[in-house]
Amino acid sequence: EAERRAAGLPTSEERTALVHHHLLAVVGPTPRVTITVPRGDLRAASLHHPSRWIAGIGTRRDIDSHAHGLATVEFPVSAAEHRARQLWVLARAGGDIRDHPAHHDDVVLRRAVAMLDARAGVGMTEYDGDLSSRPTPPFIGPVSPTAIEQWVKCPHAYFVAHVLGVYEVEEPADIITVSALERGSAIHDAIDRLQQAVLRGDVAPPGPDGWTPAHQALLHELAEDVADDLEARGVAGRAATWATARPLIIEELGRWIEVDRQHWGDRRLLLSEQHFGGPDETPVDIELPDGRRLAFVGAIDRVVELPDGTLLVTDHKTSKVEDLDQVATDPTVGGTRFQLPVYAAAARALLGRPEAPVRAEFAFFSRGRFARHGVTFDDTTWAQVRADLAQVVAGIDAGVFPARPKAPGFQRWVDCACCDPDGLGTADRFAEWERTRADPRLPRWFPTEAPLTA
């Protein structure tokens, strides 16, 4: 407050008084005023108490719910509310709203009833993911491996993002702490800056003993820079949480370079954060069993060459994903993970070595105990990758886009914004999915015994 006074800005107390003055200025000369106040917070399951400013303004009336208000109001304010009350009375009396004249006259109501009936039934319909009756938009251009994975996890989320082009909007003002996505991007950025310095010749490459203290010191400086960038972009969260998160990011990078040093040996750094598949970038595709070629777009975290000439592709993972340790025996983890195969194909294309032996690995950070899990790609591995990719492409081509939520249960984050848009849980959507998955067409992609999401 002292700083605000020194700058000539109103204090918090003065701003509050001004807002109160504005309220009185609006209410005072107005013959009739209606003030609505929420009775509670559904997320927190708590009551809201009205502001003391409105305590003496007029008569208070408690309305239990929208339905209660509509049923007890003396005269509905619109034809829509009048019609809604008629339908409510009919339903309360045991009648069927399909018999009401509004059902025949109101296209919106008729479609809404049809949608509810379809979603309450068994199987997949046009209201819950069946677009087989309409031509499915083909891949307009190269697709990212994570988009392919998204269809496997939740076809509806894939449809919303990659067919409709609708994405969740995050408001910086709502950010309490730095998100896992931004944190991971910052770590990737710091490592890339270090590796780009090596590739440019600004610093010496790691020798047989790996990264040196000079590399460690440079990475620490770069970590401070990317942390500053997060703050400047307004995505670091509140100051209190950022004060803890910032040093943890820098510490984690310090631990990473020490672990990576132990793995280095006689490797030679070739590529860092190398993009492919975009405009003016190297094209990358994988041939499917039917001869089609699926083009991909993305970026490889790192490619190094081993002493025997093998290309080693690394995908850094700052999060912890339980099933990724299976890639050694199943390169797509049951047809759900396609990053490593795509990055392996991209490494060959980017370096112009289509027949080079290639191995790809996930390299985890602290949440994954800095473990590394990888797979060497041979003819058998590539055949499985092509077959699993063809399965996903067939589902997209068939117009299969049902919502596939996780089973309801407590968690601190929203796993899929399309399945849980209000953050209140997936109980209703999961019940719909249980009915939808009974459709005889779906076991090809979503066997009943398979886990619903990873």
Image (cartoon, helix red, strand yellow):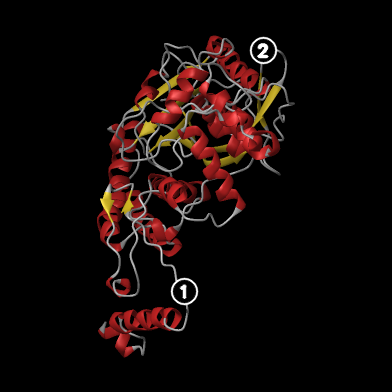
The quadrant holding residue 412 is top left
80 or 120, which lies in front?
Answer: 80
Q: Residue 231: tell me if it is visible.
A: yes
Residue 113 in the image, given as x and y percentages of width and height: 59, 31
Q: CA distance from mark 2 to mark 1?
A: 72 Å
Residue 397 in the image, given as x and y percentages of width and height: 68, 22
Tell which circle, 2 or 1, labels the residue nearer the N-terminal end.
1
Q: Are marks 2 and 1 in contact (CB under 8 Å)?
A: no
Q: Amino acid at mark 1?
A: Arg
Q: Quick one: quadrant of the N terminus?
A: bottom left
Q: Residue 311: tell me if it is visible.
A: no
For label 2, the SS is loop
Q: Quick one: quadrant of the C terminus?
A: top left
The quadrant holding residue 107 is top right
176 or 192, which lies in front?
Answer: 176
Which class describes the residues within 10 Å of circle 2: few (<14), some (14-19), or many (20+)?
A: some
Residue at the image point whose x is 48% and y is 12% from the top: 447
Q: Amino acid at mark 2?
A: Pro
For label 1, the SS is loop
Q: Nearer the viewer, mark 2 or mark 1?
A: 1
Q: How many marks?
A: 2
Which class describes the residues within 10 Å of circle 1: few (<14), some (14-19), or many (20+)?
A: few
Residue position for label 2: 289
Residue position for label 1: 32
